[in-house]
Image (cartoon, rainbow, N blue to C red):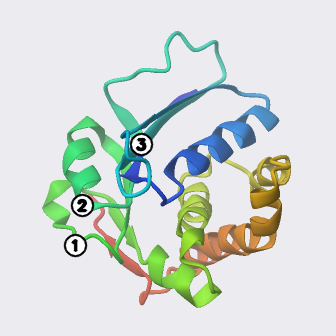
Amino acid sequence: MEKRILIGGSGGQGILFMGKVIASAAMLDGKNVTWFPSYGAEMRCGTANCAVVISDEPIGSPVFSSADILVVFTEASLQKFTPRLNKDGYLLYDSSLITHDSSIHNGAIGINVTALARELGNTKAANMIMLGAAAAITGLLAKEDLFSAIESDMSECMLKALSINKRAILKGYEIVENQENSYFRHRVCT
């Protein structure tokens, strides 16, 4: 099994952190992992994306041309990275910030993560809500491994955000499990 994940958005949205948590959780599950961050020189509000590869086998390169899972938080990232998504891949996008034409990709799933994060009291938690939703949709990562991954980051900033991040991950799982229509915007299946 090898899964290639591409996450795109703007600096300050937690794009790189989301990828780092995915990589850490997969390592805790005993998988081989690469995490390849990329960001614009301006950081906050500039472009940001990262590529994560998870595999049972050794990984030859962190660089890939096509993704199995694409997660985007901005319209620009949607336009830039959708051509790299496999035909049968997952496209998850923040429907709070992106107006998506479902003809771009079948199976696209919009989740109103920014609005949900606002309800939790911190819009910076949108990335963790999306992470929980992506894990629930794909079945790729266990909830316990995600929690362990965020608990292992002992920086002062992350320790302050630990509680909200855990609640946000749980909210992502909950939205998918209940498919709450007010947050779960599109799902076009073929």
Q: Residue at x 82, y 57 (%)?
A: 156
Q: Which mark is residue 49?
A: 3
What's the distance in space between the residues labelled 3 and 2, CA to CA? Answer: 13 Å
**Mark 3 touching mark 2, by CB under 8 A?**
no
Question: Mark 2 highlights which residue?
Answer: 75
Q: Is residue 145 above or below residue 165?
A: above
Comes first in the chain, label 1 or label 3:
3
For label 1, the crowd category at 10 Å Cα-Cα, with few meaning under 14, some 14 to 19 and many 20 or more, is few
70 or 164, nearer to the observer: 164
Q: Residue 76 at what x, y percent from top left? A: 23, 54
Residue 119 lies in what quarter of the image? bottom right
Q: Is residue 83 left or right of residue 67?
A: left
Image quadrant where one finds the N terminus:
top right
Q: Residue 40 at what x, y percent from top left? A: 36, 40
Q: Residue 13 at what x, y percent from top left? A: 48, 60
Question: Mark 1 highlights which residue?
Answer: 99
Residue 5 in view: no
Residue at the outermost front position: 42
35 or 55, nearer to the observer: 35
What's the distance in space between the residues labelled 1 and 2, CA to CA? Answer: 8 Å
Residue 188 in view: yes
Q: Residue at x 63, y 41 (%)?
A: 20
Q: Is residue 32 above or below residue 45?
A: above
Residue 41 lies in what quarter of the image? top left
**Mark 1 touching mark 2, by CB under 8 A?**
yes
Q: Which mark is residue 12?
A: none
Kind of residue at disc 3: Asn
Q: Residue at x 60, y 61 (%)?
A: 136
Kind of residue at disc 2: Glu
Q: Residue at x 53, y 9 (%)?
A: 60
Kind of residue at disc 1: Thr
